[in-house]
Image: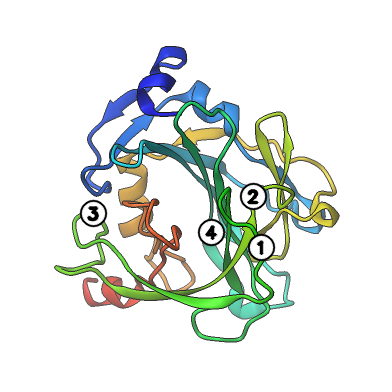
Amino acid sequence: MDVTLSARYFQLEKYQSRFTLPPIESYICDDFAKMYKPEIYGGDYSEPEPEGIYYRILYEPILRMLCLQYYVYWLEQNCLGLLPVADHHYDYEPIFIYLQHSSIFPVGIVNGGYSKGLGVSCRFHKTEIRMKEITERDSNEYEAKYKTSPDPFYPFGGKEGLNGAACIKKYPLAGAVYFNNSHPMFGIASCSHVFSGAEKDLRGRVLSIPLKRLGDQILNEWYFEHFKSEDEEPFGHDVSNTFDFPYIKYCNPKPFLQRNR
């Protein structure tokens, strides 16, 4: 489903975003985002509830591919004393949904999942990559290196972008995630709010989370205003290009923000 076809059925509104790497284009459309909005099961971690699911839509004209960027956003991450080092204000967990050509069914879903790895790049998180062309599930997660976009597209990227690394695991799209109509279904897998598409984690109540727009005003607030104290977690994700492997790109922004206080 390319942006032209989408526009026939939905009123996609194009806007200029500082945080989008050309030639990628940015759009918003509440009805379109509602159609694919993830369904989140709280399980053992339904409290505190997320403040919102923030979205924006990116279009890559060369690939003719759309990405619905969703970030589930909490005002607090509280592990109730089980993992005190993980407690902080603000938390952001991504789910990206990819559509291409005339298909209304996703060709890819990428999300932040739970990692048992102890490497520096894992941080108890792994990137779960489900793509239509993947035919075999990885037996183990592994480290993938990447470079972010430069500033201003990623505000902590400097002139050449930052080098980063993440733990990833790839899965075939078919059978690796369940759907309720067009809504992918995820459970919250730990107190750090990472997601799981496994059937065993789709339990508890479905959270009623409002859908909100991820515009530049919100991104500026997350990037620059969410580190007023050491227990606040700023937004370290590079949202500017979600079409480049491994899709989710995160770097710790705290050293940058500390220097500029």
Q: For numbered disc 1, what is the local secondary structure?
A: loop
Q: Point out the image quarter for the C terminus.
A: bottom left
Residue at 24%, 67% in the rendered image: 157
Residue 261 vs residue 6: left or right? left
Q: Whole-Å distance between the Cαs marked 3 and 2?
A: 30 Å
> What type is the residue that disc 2 sits on?
Leu
> What type is the residue that disc 4 sits on?
Asp
As drawn, the residue found furthest toward the top would be 8
Q: Earlier in the sequence, mark 3 or mark 1?
A: 1
Residue 208 appears in which quarter of the rendering? top right
Query: How far across and how far down the image is residue 240, in percent?
Result: 31, 51
Q: Badge 1 local density, few (<14 within 10 Å), some, or many (20+)? A: few
Per the image, the residue denoted by label 3 is 153
Per the image, the residue denoted by label 1 is 136
Q: Whole-Å distance between the Cαs marked 3 and 1?
A: 34 Å
Give me the disc on residue 91. Answer: 4
Pick whichever, 212 or 246, lies toward us: 246
Q: For numbered disc 2, what is the local secondary structure?
A: loop
Viewer-nearest of labels 3 and 1? 1
> What type is the residue that disc 1 sits on?
Glu
Per the image, the residue denoted by label 2 is 173
Q: Earlier in the sequence, mark 1 or mark 4?
A: 4
Viewer-nearest of labels 2 and 4? 2
Q: Earlier in the sequence, mark 2 or mark 4?
A: 4
Q: Badge 4 local density, few (<14 within 10 Å), some, or many (20+)? A: many
Viewer-nearest of labels 3 and 2? 2
Q: For numbered disc 4, what is the local secondary structure?
A: strand
Pick whichever, 183 or 215, lies toward us: 183
Q: Whole-Å distance between the Cαs marked 3 and 4?
A: 21 Å
> What type is the residue that disc 3 sits on?
Phe
